[in-house]
Image: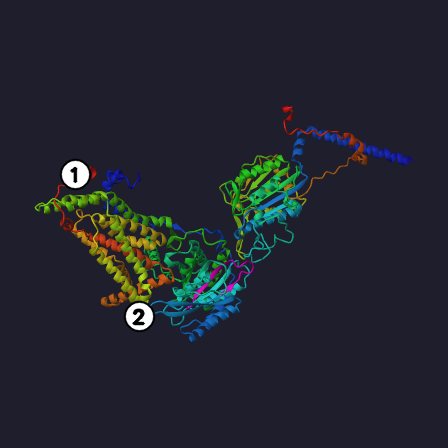
């Protein structure tokens, strides 16, 4: 009995010390300005989404499909589930009659990885990839009856990755062979996303010619953008597979992938490093970055904040008082409901102004 | 009031009057400008480097996969074919070709056609083409590419190109094993040169159309199988498996050309395979003379225009252009030298096979017909071209002479007519001054006045124009009339005699029919307008023809002057003489004579003249046959456009006016009434 008492006292003492120490440290950080800085630098997202778009069709644009499928493969490997990846592919390269390897798409002439493997879920394919569908997807204004897999169901806690590839010009990106999305339309779409609390942070990545023109009009907060080339520059392809006879992948995406391939789910690599993957020496075009809308330091943001689905978890040693609600809290008293029901009489307005003639 | 019918603009403009005095100088300036412009285009500053504008072609991105075994197959097939050729001296070994195509697993069909030769009582020829279709393995048969090889029997007068067939078959065998074809490939072996090709194309596109059998000359029949819309075609004419160089032929029917992208594609792929290839490529000569770049370019340019101007395709590819299928011929010449070859005979054809494979794969990548690059161009060098926008101004400058002169003639027409009338009246006054009688004088006066007030004799000029055009039209229609065809006479004498007869009528016409006063001037304006319009139209359809005709005829057109006073007699006689020389028949003869002289320099003059005469007769007959069978409109243009224009030109250069006596015979002396102000002004000149 005595021993038991002693044990209890000691546990209580330890607990008190712990709690006291804990409270002391909390006070410290709340005072220091770095604490605020840390808080802002800490990731605040709860889930991850990716929108990956290949906007161009035709066999000679094989590389764009390879680009987008490679990024798809990376984000999937780093943990974003298919249900949270929206993959838009404007043309079917795997089953193109000109493809000597039917059903397969490679991103390298060595043909190590078939990026069109067994488990690719394409959400928008072929002629479904339109500017309208893309904008509807971003802003959540999908038409009634749209399948759940074709919706971007993000919320205020979502980190969204948007990757675009295709043929672009100054201020637009060509979709299919018939229409374009302008940089203004993109900026408006993202602003609407922000207003509708559809993202927490947004990473916008685009690999086209004159890609930097696409993020110029952005004005929404928490957007970090990177583009493969500045305005007036062309983005170039990396190499040809002479057995298929097409360009395999674009330079920027190639070097981005080279970086991503080394990233593991618990990697400490940061977005800051990722922004420097393709120096002008190898890319030939200059990679453009826009950081002014983004309040965190990219060098302190882990890459998995956008390319993975690693949720921030806090291990708590505190006791957390969770009071379970009783059943009666939920079930209302039928009598109360009856009381709440107002008595009312239906008054019909006369159709004709008959009182004037009385 | 309309701009053109406003008299205050047309007759009283000082600028026009001043220009009218210098019309010849201005026209000569324009003429020189046009010719110099075309010459300048040969300068590197005025033409452009070729480039590929169709992204989809992506030429040379694939490694060729065709290997030595294809070459071995080609050699083996060539040996077999040579054995067959011993048995088929003047026919095609259809059975052997069909058996080979079948053996390679292609869908093989035979196409029969009949030619009903209309001349000399009529004959029938039968022909047979063999083709095999390789269906695209993973896509619907909506589009196709054609690879053709003409077969020539050993008895043919043309160079032997029988190795094209084994080469085509070897490529077909290779292509059969590949799964990446997005278009059907048709391997076609034709006979009887362009006739077989034409029949096959007609059968492919209009085979199901019901023909009026009694009127049609070529009965193409129908095809048992097709392969969708044809996107491109490659004609292969190989003299030997060991080749020296490749000549890329592009000129098609009526001077049409394949898209420049296709030419560039072939050039690029040939260069990659290390084959000497080019437009009008010839064997490399010793570097004796090194002409300047400008001279070389100019020669190349003029050579291309000369080939185009006749409108006769220089290969089987040319017939595809009519159906908007881009096609060209790669004609490989036999290797002449045998010393120090890098390859042996066992692999000699590999580069060419690789090139064909590369071209096929690029064409396979096409997403739609060729449309990006130029259809109208002149090649000045293998990698330089002139676009239509650059060469058309040369023709426009030449033709502008005609329009410019027409406008000035029109705007000074009234005054000239007055002058002519005055000139007619004045002698009448003097002549009849001694004679008495005044009763009919009033009548005469009013006669001339009404003629002038009514304006110009539009009616008679229109009738004259119609008659002249009718003569030309008859030249197009007459030789094909049934009663002419039944005459037991060859095509050449028949056509020539009909054309000569019509030319003779045209020659005599201005002596017989004399237009009333003012008619000549009006005819002059009409002639200039018709001349200008027809040359511009011909130039748009076939620039080379339009340009060459303009170059030789515009000086005469500038020199033509119908007015009597400001033209010396010798000048007029010179114009008449040149006009006679420019008769279409004479021009054809001179061209044929020049070509015969170039070809047989050893012949004596009298024999040469005779030979040229028969050749010119043949040429006119071939022109007519090309017209009715292939749709070459050179004959039509010559007989229906150039012949009437020549008759008009002849009429104008003669300037036969109604004799003064025609007026004076019954005219009475009468003091002339004072003319209205503007006309009086010109009368004093």
> For mark 2, what is the residue?
B488
| In the image, residue A169 above or below residue B333 | above
Crowding at dot 2, Cα within 10 Å, few <14 / some 14-19 / many 20+, comes out as few
Q: Could you give the CA–CA distance between mark 1 and mark 2, rounded to whole angstroms?
A: 67 Å
Q: Which residues are magenta?
A: B132-151
In the structure shown, which secondary structural element does the residue marked by tag 2 occupy? loop
**Is residue B16 or residue B34 the one in the foreground?**
B16
In the structure shown, which secondary structural element does the residue marked by tag 1 occupy? loop
| In the image, residue B193 above or below residue A67 | below
- In the rendered image, the residue lying farthest to the front is A358
- In the rendered image, the residue lying farthest to the bottom is B87
Rendering coords of residue B149 (x, y %): 44, 65
Q: Is residue B192 left or right of residue A145?
A: left
**Residue B442 appears in which quarter of the rendering?**
top left
Position of the N terminus of chain A, as image quadrant, is top right
**Residue B117 appears in which quarter of the rendering?**
bottom left
- Which numbered disc, 1 or 2, marks the residue that appears first in the sequence? 2
Q: Which mark is residue B674?
A: 1
Position of the C terminus of chain A, as image quadrant, is top right
């Amino acid at each position: 009995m005595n021993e038991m008492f002693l044990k209890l006292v000691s546990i209580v003492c330890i607990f008190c010390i712990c709690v006291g120490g804990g409270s002391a440290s909390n006070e410290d950080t709340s005072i220091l300005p770095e604490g605020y800085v840390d808080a802002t630098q800490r990731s605040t997202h709860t889930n991850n989404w990716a929108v990956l778009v290949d906007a161009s069709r035709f066999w000679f644009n094989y590389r764009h499909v390879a680009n987008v499928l490679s990024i798809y493969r990376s984000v999937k490997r780093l943990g974003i589930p298919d249900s949270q990846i929206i993959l838009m592919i404007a043309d079917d390269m795997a089953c193109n009659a000109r493809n000597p390897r039917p059903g397969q798409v490679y991103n390298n002439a060595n043909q190590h990885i078939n990026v069109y493997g067994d488990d690719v879920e394409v959400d928008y394919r072929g002629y479904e990839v339109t500017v309208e569908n893309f904008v509807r997807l971003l802003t959540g204004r999908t038409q009634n009856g749209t399948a759940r897999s074709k919706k971007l169901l993000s919320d205020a806690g979502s980190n969204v990755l948007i990757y675009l590839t295709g043929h672009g010009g100054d201020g637009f990106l060509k979709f299919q062979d018939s229409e374009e999305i302008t940089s203004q339309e993109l900026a408006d779409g993202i602003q609407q996303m922000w207003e509708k609390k559809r993202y927490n942070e947004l990473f916008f990545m685009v690999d086209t010619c004159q890609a930097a023109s696409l993020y110029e009009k952005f004005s929404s907060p928490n957007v970090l953008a990177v583009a493969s080339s500045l305005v007036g520059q062309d983005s170039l392809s990396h190499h040809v597979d002479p057995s298929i006879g097409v360009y395999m992948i674009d330079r920027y995406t190639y070097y981005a992938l080279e970086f991503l391939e080394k990233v593991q789910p618990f990697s400490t690599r940061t977005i800051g490093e990722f922004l420097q993957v393709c120096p002008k020496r190898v890319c030939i075009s200059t990679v453009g970055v826009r950081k002014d809308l983004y309040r965190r330091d990219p060098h302190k943001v882990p890459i998995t904040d956008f390319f993975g689905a690693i949720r921030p978890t806090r291990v708590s040693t505190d006791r957390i008082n969770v009071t379970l609600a009783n059943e009666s809290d939920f079930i209302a008293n039928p009598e109360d409901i009856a009381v709440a029901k107002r008595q009312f009489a239906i008054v019909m307005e006369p159709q004709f102004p008959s009182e004037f003639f009385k | 009031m309309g701009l053109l019918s406003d008299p205050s603009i047309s007759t009283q403009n000082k600028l026009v009057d001043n220009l009218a005095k210098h019309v010849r100088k201005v026209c000569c300036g324009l003429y020189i400008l046009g010719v110099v412009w075309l010459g300048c285009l040969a300068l590197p500053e005025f033409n452009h480097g070729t480039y590929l504008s169709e992204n989809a072609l992506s030429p040379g991105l694939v490694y060729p996969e065709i290997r030595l075994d294809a070459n071995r197959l080609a050699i083996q097939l060539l040996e077999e074919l040579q054995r067959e050729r011993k048995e088929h001296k003047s026919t095609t070994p259809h059975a052997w070709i069909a058996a080979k195509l079948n053996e390679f697993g292609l869908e093989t069909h035979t196409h029969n056609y009949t030619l009903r030769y209309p001349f000399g009582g009529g004959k029938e020829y039968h022909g047979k083409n063999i083709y095999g279709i390789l269906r695209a393995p993973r896509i619907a048969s909506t589009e196709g590419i054609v690879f053709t090889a003409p077969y020539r029997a050993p008895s043919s007068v043309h160079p032997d190109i029988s190795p094209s067939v084994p080469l085509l078959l070897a490529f077909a065998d290779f292509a059969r094993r590949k799964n990446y074809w997005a278009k059907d490939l048709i391997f076609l072996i034709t006979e009887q040169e362009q006739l077989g090709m034409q029949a096959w194309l007609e059968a492919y596109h209009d085979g199901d159309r019901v023909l009026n059998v009694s009127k049609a000359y070529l009965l193409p029949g129908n095809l048992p199988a097709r392969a969708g819309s044809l996107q491109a075609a490659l004609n292969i004419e190989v003299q030997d498996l060991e080749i020296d160089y490749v000549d890329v032929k592009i000129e098609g029917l009526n001077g049409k050309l394949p898209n420049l992208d296709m030419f560039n594609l072939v050039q690029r792929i040939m260069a990659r395979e290390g084959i000497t290839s080019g437009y009008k490529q010839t064997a490399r000569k010793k570097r004796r003379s090194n002409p300047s770049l400008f001279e070389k370019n100019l020669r190349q340019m003029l050579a291309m225009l000369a080939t185009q101007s006749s409108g006769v395709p220089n290969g089987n590819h040319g017939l595809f252009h009519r159906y908007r299928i881009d096609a060209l011929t790669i004609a490989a010449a036999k290797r002449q030298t045998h010393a120090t070859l890098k390859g042996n005979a066992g692999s000699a054809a590999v580069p060419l096979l690789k090139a064909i494979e590369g071209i096929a794969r690029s064409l396979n990548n096409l997403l739609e017909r060729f449309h990006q690059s130029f259809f109208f161009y002149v090649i000045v060098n293998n990698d330089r071209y002139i676009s239509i926008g650059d060469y058309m101004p040369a023709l426009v400058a030449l033709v502008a002479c005609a329009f410019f002169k027409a406008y000035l003639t029109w705007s000074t027409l009234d005054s000239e007519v007055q002058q002519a009338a005055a000139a007619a009246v004045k002698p009448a006054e003097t002549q009849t001054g001694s004679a008495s009688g005044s009763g009919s004088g009033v009548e005469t006066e009013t006669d001339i006045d009404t003629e002038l007030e009514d304006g110009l004799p539009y009616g008679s000029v229109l009738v004259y124009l119609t008659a002249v055009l009718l003569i030309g039209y008859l030249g197009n229609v007459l030789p094909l009339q049934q009663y002419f065809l039944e005459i037991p006479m060859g095509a050449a004498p028949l056509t020539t005699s009909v054309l000569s007869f019509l030319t003779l009528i045209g020659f005599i016409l201005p002596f017989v029919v004399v237009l009333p006063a003012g008619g000549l001037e009006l005819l002059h304006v009409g002639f200039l307008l018709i001349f200008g319009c027809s040359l511009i139209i011909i130039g748009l359809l076939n620039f080379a023809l339009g340009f060459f005709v303009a170059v030789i005829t515009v000086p005469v057109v500038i020199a033509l002057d119908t007015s009597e006073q400001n033209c010396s007699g010798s000048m007029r006689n010179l114009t008449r003489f040149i006009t006679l020389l420019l008769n279409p028949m004479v021009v054809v003869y001179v061209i044929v004579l020049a070509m015969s002289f170039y070809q047989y320099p050893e012949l004596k003059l009298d024999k040469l003249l005779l030979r040229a005469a028969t050749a010119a007769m043949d040429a006119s007959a071939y022109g007519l046959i090309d017209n009715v069978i292939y749709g070459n409109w050179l004959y039509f243009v010559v007989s229906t456009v150039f012949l009437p224009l020549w008759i008009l030109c002849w009429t104008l250069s003669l300037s036969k006016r109604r004799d003064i006596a025609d007026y004076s015979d019954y005219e009475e002396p009468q003091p002339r009434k004072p003319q209205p102000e503007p006309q009086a002004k010109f009368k004093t000149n």
